[in-house]
Image: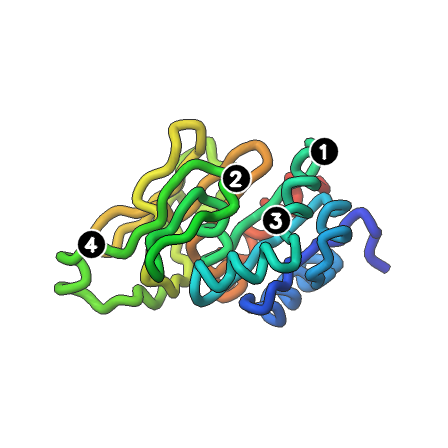
Amino acid sequence: MVDPSQAVTIVDYGMGNLHSLSAAIRHLGFLPKVTASQYEIARSRIILLPGVGSFSVAMEAIQERQIDVGLKEALGRGNARVLGICLGMQLLTEFSVEDGGSEGLGLVAGRVEPFSESVAKAMPVPHVGFNLVQSTDESRLFQGLPRESDFYFVHSYRLENASPGLRVSWAEYGERFVAAFESPQVYGVQFHPEKSQSNGLKMLENFLKLVVP
């Protein structure tokens, strides 16, 4: 039986890859708990914020359910960690220009923009498939992985830069963009770890063990 302390909250606002992510969490010996409840999220220590689709639609759903309030309450206790995945990573930032522009959760500084026109002319967008991520020795998410490791991406928008206070890992698709960021409580990955085979499982395990060693 899984220890209740190993429960992992997966935020459900109607736009996430919940089944595959839950299966990956269960495979790692943790207990996935899928919820849209503000109150359950607020009491959680390990939180995953997945997402696919439109930034503005996602933020509307998050605010309607007051998930944003629950996330900030959980982080305000100081012992919780959140990992944003794909669109979920973008939602953690301050702003996205998608669909005319929308404010994000503002948990980290940064602005989400489309790939540049030169990239869009030269390469298929959305960016779909496995791509190398370049991490650093100091990264906590990529511990035990080569400094260049493949992960699976599906996205048309990207975080070009991140605030100086974040530890950043990079990828390139015609231009460099933020593939992952790390702070003491807030983490984000632009790729899908649940679709990235053994590298993705290792990265997820690293995140989970930041809270439950």
> Residue at the location (41% across, 62% down)?
152
Camera-side residue of 128 and 95: 95
Q: Taking 178 as reference, is 105 left or right? A: right
In primary-sequence order, the first of circles 2 and 1 is 1
- The reply to whether residue 158 is in sight is no
Disc 4 residue crowd, few under 14, some 14–19, many 20+, Cα 10 Å: few
Camera-near label (3 vs 2) is: 3
Q: How many marks?
A: 4
1 or 4: tag closer to the N-terminus: 1
Amino acid tagged 4? Ser
Instruction: Tell me the kind of residue under disc 1.
Output: Arg
**Quadrant position of residue 117:** bottom left
Residue receiving disc 3: 68
| Camera-side residue of 70 and 171 | 70
Q: Secondary structure at mark 3?
A: helix
| Nearer mark to the viewer, of 1 and 3 | 3
Query: Which type of secondary structure does the marked residue at label 2 adopt?
Result: loop
Q: Please, is residue 67 above or below residue 16 in the view?
A: above
Task: Rate crowding at label 3 as few (under 14), some (14 to 19) or many (20 or more) other CA atoms within 10 Å.
Answer: many
Mark toward the start of the polypeptide (3 vs 2): 3
The residue pinned by badge 2 equals 107
